[in-house]
Amino acid sequence: MKLKKKTIKNLSIALVIIITISFGANSLFFKEDPAKVELAQCLTDKGVKMYGAFWCGACASQKKEFGSAFKEINYIECDERGEDAQPEVCKLEEITVYPTWEINGQKSSEVKSLASLAATAGCKY
């Protein structure tokens, strides 16, 4: 009986340690990059927009460049099946290729580096 209690106690302690390490590692490895957040906020403040579609591989690649900071980007979902879709806006803007960036009134359809986006929009990065 003592062996079972000791084993359960040891397993409980091990589980607590594993959970603690997991949360610590999560905050270490998935921390937002302040430079990317600042860039994304600057782009949004300057009226920059990214048009895309949820199924678009190039759009996913572009989003990955920003990481968690992408939530700051003014993103317009063009496919009516996507989350918060705005297909009427995309149609009005004649968006046919994804991703399409609109910066300073100019549209460019390609995946862009963060440095390129910053330079074109006049943001720091």
Image (cartoon, grey):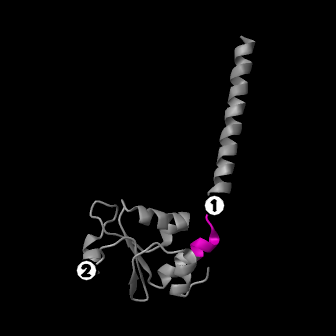
The picture places residue 100, in percent across and down from the top left corner, at 39, 75
First along the sequence among labels 1 and 2: 1
Q: What secondary structure is the stretch in magenta mostly built from? A: helix
Callout 2: SS: helix
> Is residue 23 found left or right of 89 in the rendered image?
right
* Residue at the (52%, 80%) spot, across then down: 117
Q: In which quarter of the image is the N terminus?
A: top right
CA distance separating discs 1 and 2: 37 Å
Q: Name the residue under label 1.
A: 31
The answer to whether residue 48 is magenta is no
Rendering quarter of residue 92: bottom left
Rendering quarter of residue 81: bottom left
Front: mark 1 or 2: 2
Q: Is residue 66 above or below residue 9?
A: below
Residue most extreme to the top: 1
Q: In which quarter of the image is the C terminus?
A: bottom right
Q: What residue type is labelled 1?
A: Lys
Q: How many marks?
A: 2
Callout 1: SS: loop
* Residue at the (29%, 65%) spot, across then down: 79
The picture places residue 96, in percent across and down from the top left corner, at 29, 74
Q: Is residue 100 above or below residue 13?
A: below
The picture places residue 48, in percent across and down from the top left corner, at 44, 81
Observer-nearest residue: 10 or 98?
98
The picture places residue 71, in percent across and down from the top left corner, at 48, 67
Q: What stretch is highlighted in magenta?
A: 31-38
Rendering quarter of residue 38: bottom right
Observer-nearest residue: 53 or 31?
53
Q: Residue 92 carries which label?
A: 2
Observer-nearest residue: 68 or 60?
60
Q: Which amino acid does label 2 sit on?
A: Leu
Label 2 neighbourhood size at 10 Å, few (<14), some (14-19), many (20+)?
Answer: few
